[in-house]
Image (cartoon, rainbow, N blue to C red):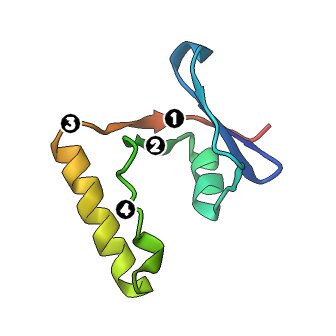
Amino acid sequence: MVEVRKGRFERLVLVGGRQVWEPQPAVPATPGWLCAAAVGGALVTVVPPGTWPADLGALPPEHRADVFEGSLTAARDSGEVLQGVAAVDLA
C-alpha cells in the first residue's frame, strides 16, 4: 500500500506491513497518484540503487527521460526490478 498524507507520498508498505520504504523527505503526490487512489491502485516500480543515473540532473531536460528509460530498461531486462499494483491510502 502507498500512504499519502497531506498531499505527500509518505511510505510504501509491503505485504504484511513488516517492511516499509519511506522517501526522505516525503515527496509531493502528483495528480497521477491522486487519480490512482480514485481508481483503486497505482503501478509501483522498485529499482535497485544506481538505476537513477547520478548525472541525470546535469543533462539537458529534453534528454533526461531517454537516459532514465535506458537505465530502467537495463535494470528490468536483468530481472532487478520489482513491479506491482498497490492500493493508495489518502487517509
Residue depth check, mark 1 versus mark 4: number of the one nearer the observer? 4
Distance (Cα) linking label 4 and label 2: 19 Å
Quarter of the image with the C terminus in it: top right
Q: Residue at x 40, y 81 (%)?
A: 59
Whether residue 75 is situated above or below residue 70 in the rendered picture: above
Distance (Cα) linking label 4 and label 3: 18 Å
Residue 53 is tagged as: 4
Residue depth check, mark 2 versus mark 3: number of the one nearer the observer? 3
Residue 79 is tagged as: 3
Residue depth check, mark 2 versus mark 1: number of the one nearer the observer? 2
Classify mark 3: helix, strand or loop. loop
Q: Residues within 10 Å of mark 2 (few under 14, many from 20)?
A: some
* Spot occupied by residue 25 in the image (x, y as percentages of width and height): 72, 49
Distance (Cα) linking label 2 and label 3: 16 Å
Residue 16 is tagged as: none
Q: Residues within 10 Å of mark 1 (few under 14, many from 20)?
A: many
The three-letter amino acid code for the residue at tag 3 is Gly
Whether residue 79 is situated above or below residue 35 in the rendered picture: above
Q: Residue at x 68, y 46 (%)?
A: 24
The answer to whether mark 2 and mark 1 are in CB contact below 8 A is yes
Horizontally, residue 2 falls left or right of residue 6, namely left
Residue labelled with disc 2: 44
Quarter of the image with the N terminus in it: top right
* Spot occupied by residue 73 in the image (x, y as percentages of width and height): 22, 55
Residue 86 is tagged as: 1
Distance (Cα) linking label 1 and label 4: 25 Å
The three-letter amino acid code for the residue at tag 4 is Pro
